[in-house]
Amino acid sequence: MTPDELPHRPKPQTNMTEEELITEIYSAFEPFLPPPEGTYVNCEAVRGRWNVVRELGNQITRSKLPTCQLYSGHRGVGKTTELLRLKDHLETKHYKVVYFAADDEDVEPQDTEYADVLFACTKNLVRSVPLAGTNPLIEWMRDRWQSLKELAVTEVEFDTLSFEQQVSQFSKITASVRAVPDIRRELRKRLNDSTPSLLAALNSFIAQARAQMPPPCKGIVIIADNLDRIAENKPDGRSNFDEIYLNRSEPMRGLDCHVIYTVPIQMIYSPRVTRLEDNYGKPDILPMVMVKSLAGEVNTVGLEKLREVIGRRLHSIDAQLPNFLVGYVFDSEATLNRLCMMSGGHMRVLMQLLQRSIDWIDELPITAEAAQIAIEEQRDTYRTALTGDRWAVLAQTHLCKRFDNEAMSLELLLNRCLIEYRYYDQAGGLRSWCDVHPLLLGFEQFQMALAKLKAKEPTAEPIAEDEG
């Protein structure tokens, strides 16, 4: 059915042409940027009661000592959105929050080591927190300028620079480190040799800054986001993940302020998680939005949350648009709900499905045909990743609703072929269960593996359901 064939197509009163409106809607669903201001949706009820203030914030505001927390989750699930919400909350509680996305300008995700993380914290602290009097980090840089100035790509003597120029040298060095592998290796070598002195300078800087902050400021919080995006490299068989988070856990925890590091989810779903917990406390994981029940039925609360996400983003364009969600933006409830359900409760997948659906229309509404094409294209991204026995593992997980921590199951979980949901049961116990991503259910290979497994094990038992 074409837009003109729809029996009733009410339109919002707006000064934008429909082409302009489609462009605005498309941009509002950008999958790789934080959501527009004012569009946050609290999904606590369908994320196992996960709340960023309770999970990460309370430990900061209630502790008399510096804290160091690890935070993880699948790529695109909404971690940055929650961290920015936490930043806003902590600032209302009178904390100075130094937030930075490490992969923007501080580290090279494909080649990251501990020295890069330490220097990123240093650079963002000295750039974000003003300090009167002698600056320990500037003094640390001055003492090592002859050794470091070639990394800043300058021949200028440090003492001839203005204070602002001296501060900018931290940024110049990190920029060179990202761009030039040889400089990156040399900086690491020099920083590793100077780690104790740099940590001492950092903590002296933090202590002076804290002493100079006027009441009611309570302290400094560093949030190092996007470290979960770094790739795992294993030169000489050693993992840089292990080197950063485990072997260097003492200096990682050594800053005299509150710190939150994002951590690659591969470390959470591995035997290393117990060592992480020993060193940092239990890592926090942001769950998916639960869009269906353990029994396979639509979770209406989860579905409504995703619809609210869409409605809030449309509201950021024009306050009228949420009232025209069905009939003008989408051709039917069924089309809107199908896109939400096929996302599996994963925010970035939802945004990608919405944008791709818009690619297949020339005028509103988003039609069932456009949505189905977007779903098929998104589904196709999984096709090459699923070979051999993986279909059997998916079928087994679909029947029993749990994964077994074996290598292939973990691979499928990390690739989001499997999705884990969490909820609290009626007795107050935290429950987790796992299922196949909805995009994969239509594959013929999956249906064949499922039929074969049912014929072989007709009495496969799922985990008991008690969803409250």
Image (spheres, rainbow, N blue to C red):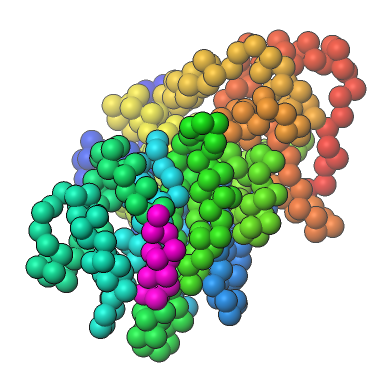
Picture mark count: 0
Q: Is residue 294 left or right of residue 459?
A: left
Whether residue 199 can be seen here: yes
Q: Nearer the viewer, residue 119 or 72?
A: 119
- Quadrant for residue 341, please give it: top right
Q: Is residue 128 left or right of residue 99?
A: left
Q: Does 166 appear above or below 22?
A: below
Tell me if residue 201 is in the magenta stretch. Answer: yes
* SS assignment for the magenta stretch, majority: helix
Q: Nearer the viewer, residue 447 or 219?
A: 219
The magenta span reads 193-206
Whether residue 336 can be seen here: no
Q: Nearer the viewer, residue 57 or 334?
A: 57
Residue at 90% x, 22% y is: 459
Q: Is residue 330 left or right of residue 238?
A: left
Q: Is residue 101 left or right of residue 276?
A: left
Tell me if residue 343 is in the magenta stretch. Answer: no
Q: Position of residue 292 (x, y in %)?
A: 67, 39
Q: Position of residue 242 (x, y in %)?
A: 56, 44
Residue at 15% x, 64% y is: 158
